[in-house]
Amino acid sequence: MEYPFEIEMKVRDYECDLQGIVNNSVYQNYLEHARHEFLTAHQVSFSELHNKGLDAVVARVDIAYKTPLRPGDKFIVRLNVRKEGYKYVFHQQIVRKEDEKLCIKARVDTVVIDNGKLIPSIPEFDALLSI
């Protein structure tokens, strides 16, 4: 799979647990940050969508943990988005920058709610599918 968007980040000490590795829950923060940066890079604003009554929400997350990150590691979060029915599916991976070692592979299903009602799509997200 190709990933047309990526962002580099660095592990901060406080993100690690007693074992000296990034806590499993922190990876979701990394993934979310990358999705937000992807949207911002393509002029999609969550606050503007919300003001129109549109809210994109996570419906499901599937993460496969492969190799742990440690304090100070630089890493790259990669992203691709596809459409499946009502869902916008973000395929993401995190690789350690130093050696391109796969750390996690994730699938994040999102849906869009229009004033409380599930809707099939919105033009702002549909435009992202051709990137």
Image: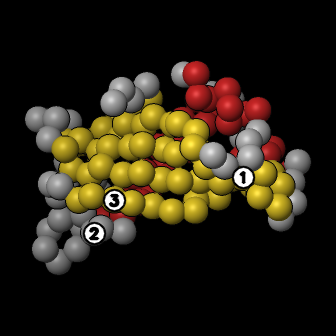
Query: Which amino acid, by three-letter code, is at mark 2?
Result: Asn
Asked which secondary structure carries label 3, the reply is strand
Spatial separation of the CA atoms under disc 1 and disc 3: 21 Å
Question: Which quarter of the rendering shows the N terminus?
Answer: top left
x, y percentage for residue 70? Answer: 17, 57
Question: Which quarter of the rendering shows the C terminus?
Answer: top right
- In the displayed structure, would residue 122 be above or below residue 29? above
* Depth order, front residue of 124/89: 89
| Residue 50 visible in the snapshot | no
Other-residue count near label 2 (Cα within 10 Å), few / some / many at <14 / 14–19 / ≥20: some
Report which residue position mark 2 lands on. 23
Report which residue position mark 1 lands on. 112
Residue drawn where x is 15% and y is 54% of the image: 67
**Mark sitting on residue 63:** 3
Asked which secondary structure carries label 2, the reply is loop
Spatial separation of the CA atoms under disc 1 and disc 2: 29 Å
